[in-house]
Amino acid sequence: GFCSPGMVMNMYSLLESKNGQVTMAEVENAFGGNICRCTGYRPILDAFKSLAVDAEPRLKEACQDIEDLTKICPKTGSACAGKCSAAGKINDKKGVHLSFSEDKEWHKVYNISDVFAIFEKIKTKPYMLVAGNTAHGVYRRSDDLQVFIDVTSIEELRSHSMGNNLTVGANVSLTELMTILTEVAAKSPNFGYCAELVKHIDLIANVPVRNTGTIAGNLSIKNQHNEFPSDLYLILEAVGAQLTIMESGGKTSTISPAQFVSKDMKKKLILNVVLPPLDPKVFVFRSFKIMPRAQNAHAYVNGAFLIKFNANKSSVESASLCFGGIDPKFTHATNTEKFLAGKNLFSNDVFQGALQTLSNELNPDWVLPDASPEYRKNLALSLFYKFVLNIAPEGNASIKSQYKSGGSVLERPVSTASQRFDTYKENWPLTKNIPKIEGLAQTSGEAQYTNDIPARPNELHAAFVLATKAHAKIEKIDASEALKQAGVVAFFSAKDIPGANNFMYFPDFMGSDIEEVFCSDRVAYHGQPVGIIVAESFALANRAVKLVKVSYGEPNDKIYPTVQDVLHAKVADRIKEMPYSTLGASYEAAPEGDMKVKGHFEIGGQYHYYMETQCCVCIPIEDGMDVYSATQWVDLTQMAIAKMLKIPQNSLNLYVRRLGGAYGGKGTRATMIACACALAAHFTKRPVRFVMTLEANMDAIGKRYPVVSDYEVDVTKEGKITKLFNEYVHDFGSNFNEGMFHAGTFFTNCYDDTVFKTVAKGVKTDCASNTFCRAPGTTEGIAMIETIMEHVAFATGLDPLEVRMANMPKDLKMLELMPQFRADVEYDARKKEIEQFNAGHRWRKRGIAIVPMRYPLGYFGSLSAIVSIFHDDGTVAISHGGIEMGQGMNTKVSQVAAYTLGIPIEKISIKPTNNLTSPNAICTGGSMTSETVSYAVKRACEMILERMQPVKEENKDDSWETLVEKCHTKNVDLCATYMFKASDLVPYIIWGLSCSEVEVDVLTGNVQLRRVDILEDVGESLSPGIDVGQIEGSFVLGL
């Protein structure tokens, strides 16, 4: 998919850096920076692991077709020499000075003296020292910077030396630092603690960032942004490292990392870091980092602890206890350090006193998106406890054996995966596991997405101006400062829209609330677009939006950003009962149970995290406009643009080749971007490209619907539910469009719902209008009922699996699947092992659960397909109304067409979706589109075959190509269209089961999935490999 070229380049870099000798663990660790974990991730990872020196035989067998690629230089045609052919002509030590517009400069230097010479020359100009430039991913560069100094080639900053101390140049990358520390730890016992540093540095960011990010760069972020939870700063401070600082005139000084944080570094350099020797006989060092994910995440809280014991290790001589993630000004737990001096750390009284002292001096601040202060304080205390458990001497009577495992953190092993599926050779290429037809184009980076469309002459770039106050009236928008910038062409707002200021024009389907393209009066939510800047470049457009001044009146009432805020305040006019409540046939007469179970359940929102942000390219043409929109719903986009511009729909030509992920987020939301882009192109009469930044995308676009659920259940001692009431409320955001209309249906899941009653409500909040997100309503409905089943099991003391089965109708197919699945995953034996493990571990707990799924698949709307066969070579071109967005739809279509026509799949090409051959197409979604377009293609193919049949009867032995040519000469129409409609196919039920075994670190809340088994009854899969990938990817998205 969209992410694949990055994965290929990352793997190539890893292989090059290791001379092709990589392990599976190194391969897996290297992909922490590739954040996509959807359909293709696991097979891509397996393919890469097959190149590892310790690859499992099954991986090597599965990927045996991978060829050895000879590296041929495209310039010379000869084997790659491993260096630039012009390298000899370049004077490596000659500095570079480049000047640009707006008085900006770029310098490349090779000596420290050159840096200070530039400092002197530039006077007060804002400057930036450039090394890895990775900080830009955390804090965006200031637009005011004028001078950039590339310091990557200064040898003195990249060297290291070993004497009594270890001195490492400040411009050494984090990856190089890990290598240096590993080598030093192996050679010198006094630097054995460096191995612990390496473990912690391996948790910083990800491999590509560590490959380029430097020591000085990481520390400089902490210097400029004290709130940054720098792991490197923390561990260096804990072990007593020193930083050497140079300023003009060659003057140097040595300071601690803690002193560095508050030091004015204007026109100064970090020369190196000095690490001291620590005698392992008396020093003990450990560090911890607790983060939301196992890789590529900032810490909730991190801790680094160094204890110096006396000679017989009976008492603490000194302590360095450092924490991050508490407060920008807090590093050392000074009071606790003082308390421990001279005391026996492993005495229970001393330890309890230390915990109390530490608790008293931990006062976390709370700046979103930080975790709550309570959690972070408890986490810091837990880390200190972990440290003590970890270093406690064996046989310490005060530490029970079941507590010891609390001293370590959960460590992820190298992941493994296996897949099994049915295939039927008599139906091939149907049911055959084949590579995705776009796979090579996507992994090579040649597959074209919306923003890959070549730039047109005179093309402009657009960017939203977003509101910064919710519920306030816009009194004035002043774009004059932005328009003064050279290259800024125009600003458009609501007053410029010639037609309807509404991008949700689809009455009686998704809701009737107006959603404005640009806010015209009172702001609905922080981040709502109020206008659009059009400029000559992407960077300029996004800089210029910051210069647009929006004046607001005071908010007219209280702001309610969440569903909880509305419910707690009981704001009646924001709460609306939805039409998808349910009432079981026996609910009113249902008896009370032996006990009542009441509970409250919440599901938060979820950003879609498509790799390709919302984007669109609009090109004015002689009779209208070509629109290349990254949308799941061409018809809605076409209607909304036409209504907004007051132009006929037939003047718009819409094209979608593929999307870089969507998950529902580009169903209705993409239309807002397309409308804004089309407006700019309409008035400027120039092509306009609109690609949202990730920040703007997250601000302006809604997410999954957050839900709160309150339930009351009557249940027997045997776990049988006799009556169930569930009221759930979901957060629509700023209007009541779309919604979770599937939630009531899927709340039933696999259970007897005759005694169920659900009441569905929605609330309007002051946030971006929420929207469909993968399995909308389905996820929430199943999560609610399965939470209730777990609660019932807890209340009755029964196995949750037995409770689930007790509440299934007797004729349910799940009762056939469940026993076999239970046996296949060894549920009962593993459950006993887990119970034994939990009895022996106080701070580690494991659990296992089987959760069923009943997914009633339905059909709606219509989708067209056109099949054309070309007479000269018999090749086939197909276009359909579905949107390929990584789910492999085009591959399935190709397989269906090849099977129906009886030709090789190589003869088939899938063309972009467009509104000429597939007009009025329903949104791609609801798990049905691959099937429905495949059906339309099948019917179109059958229509052509029927026309060809008379000719075939006369020429039974002809090849396909000859037959097609003869049909053409006889004027047989070799093009057919078919429109799928909902009544064409019979709805059916998809059954699924998953079994997950999880381990939890009770002290930190960290979770590790130890094993997951998934079974899905898909009938006969059109393309098993793709369906397996979809199942794996959707499971991970649910995590």
Image: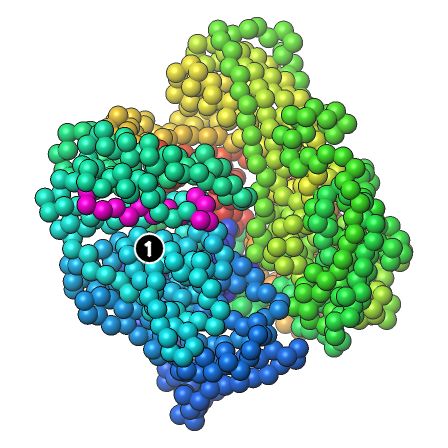
Position of 632 compared to 532: left or right? Answer: left
Q: Residue furthest left?
A: 312
Q: Residue furthest bottom?
A: 89
Q: Is residue 492 magenta?
A: no
Type of secondary structure dominating the magenta stretch:
strand
Q: Secondary structure at mark 1?
A: helix
Q: Which residue is mark 1?
A: 237
Counting labels gives 1
Mark 1 surroundings within 10 Å by alpha-carbon count, few (fewer than 14), some (14 through 19), many (20 or more):
many
Residue at the image point whose x is 19% and y is 50% from the top: 283
**In terms of depth relative to the viewer, which is nearer, 994 or 788?**
788
Q: Is residue 323 magenta?
A: yes
Q: Is residue 893 above or below residue 511?
A: below
The image quadrant of residue 582 is top right
The image shows residue 407 at horizontal and vertical percentages of: 26, 39
The image shows residue 871 at horizontal and vertical percentages of: 69, 70
**In terms of depth relative to the viewer, which is nearer, 854 or 938?**
854
Position of 56 compared to 477: left or right? Answer: left
For the question of whether residue 406 can be seen, the reply is yes
In the picture, the quarter occupied by the N terminus is bottom right
Q: Is residue 623 above or below residue 1017?
A: below
Residue at the image point whose x is 66% and y is 18% from the top: 583
Give the magenta part as a residue range.
Answer: 316-329
Residue at the image point whose x is 49% and y is 69% from the top: 266
**In terms of depth relative to the viewer, which is nearer, 657 or 131?**
131
The image shows residue 408 at horizontal and vertical percentages of: 27, 41
**In terms of depth relative to the viewer, which is nearer, 704 or 941?**
704
Amino acid type at image mark 1:
Glu
Q: Is residue 687 above or below residue 567?
A: below
The image shows residue 332 at horizontal and vertical percentages of: 35, 47
For the question of whether residue 511 can be seen, the reply is no
Residue at the image point whose x is 70% and y is 24% from the top: 570
